[in-house]
Image: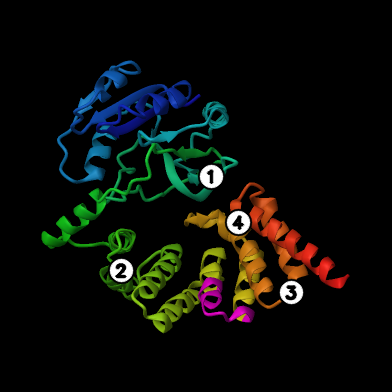
Amino acid sequence: MVTLSLCMIVRDEEAVLARCLQSVRAAVDEMILVDTGSLDGTREIAGGFTEKIYDFTWIDDFSAARNYAVSKASGDYWMWLDADDVLPREAAEKLIRLKKQLDPKTDVIMMPYGMEFDSRNRPLFLYYRERILRNSPRYRFQGRVHECVPPAGEIRKEDILVEHRPLSRKRSDRNLKIYEKMKKEKAVFTSRDLYYYGRELTEHGAYEKGEKILRQFLERGAGWEEDCLEACRQRAFCLEQLGQEEKALEALLRGLAYGVPGGEICCALGQHFLNRRRYKEAIWWFRQALSSKKREDSGGFIREDCYGYLPAVSLCVCYDRIGDLKTAERYNELAGTYKPEDPSYLYNKAYFLQREKQIKRDSI
């Protein structure tokens, strides 16, 4: 059986650290925690799980800190987590079984990363990350922020879900500040840097700057296909917020040049036409979203709602607007199969029941 080292960087994580370490402790052979300047009880909590706690001076570089942690690993493989991540019990059991039968030729294990959970505890946002890697100098993080380890060698994909469970959804400007610092230093931005810099700007409401950076990323022509598709969608959102409707549509349509569109682009196009009361066009795109296949093997971001609930409930709205109540109700019931407790579905259900009663009264 192979050995596995958990490598983490932490800072002021007393609220979530024990939860994370407890969830994974049975599946790993050693825990290595690198503290980048905690002022709370993080180190004391970490000490209840491991003696391998190290200090690293924070230099606005996530890769540098993570790679220092990895350098301390002694296992055959190493695994990374953030302090607000959790390995569910079923996932931990799967990981233990995997360690027992893992082909030693394996270099990288990709695992799903779930975020933003619905009322039935299902992730709304999902993508695969390089989670477990061979303990070799070949595998190190790159990038000051939104860091990653470029997968190479024998890559294996495992359905072992890591859940991102922060206690607060408050948006931090930490990553954006690092990119702004890089810009001030005139650092070289990789295509990945441009992509995530544009996303950070967009998420912080800097739509004009975000659109510009995302456009630069696309014009460079060196981006990963999935990132290009998402950049088109993000850029369209920026343009929409800036009141440039036609350019927003052009940005979405540009995404079609990168391959068969997924549910995310199709839903964005459907919403564009729905907002303009062009219901026939909106229906066409939402139906395309509903029939789209999730590109799970691509490694790109997957917005689960775009492959079921969102196009279904949007089709309900579209058909209601054009007066086809039976079809509208049918799509609302379909939406309910994905989210039976969703307020919009329940509201629509009551709405159709009331309409049916009214029609019966009017026919008397």
Horizontal and vertical percent position of residue 205: 30, 63
Mark 3 vs mark 1: in front? 3
Specify which label sits upstream in the sequence, 3 or 4.
3
**Between 52 and 152, the one nearer to me in the picture:** 52
Q: Is residue 292 visible?
A: no
Mark 2 vs mark 3: in front? 3
Q: Which residue is mark 3?
A: 324
Q: Which residue is mark 4?
A: 344
Residues at marks 4 and 1 touching, judged by CB atoms closer than 8 Å: no
Please, which residue is most extreme toward the left here?
185
The span picked out in magenta is 270-280
The CA span between labels 2 and 3 is 38 Å
Give the label on residue 207, or none. 2
Give the label on residue 157, or none. 1
Residue 67 vertical placement versus 348 (above, below)? above
Mark 4 vs mark 1: in front? 4
Horizontal and vertical percent position of residue 62: 25, 44
Amino acid identity at mark 1: Lys
The CA span between labels 4 and 1 is 36 Å
Mark 4 vs mark 2: in front? 4
Mark 1 vs mark 2: in front? 2
Specify which label sits upstream in the sequence, 4 or 1.
1
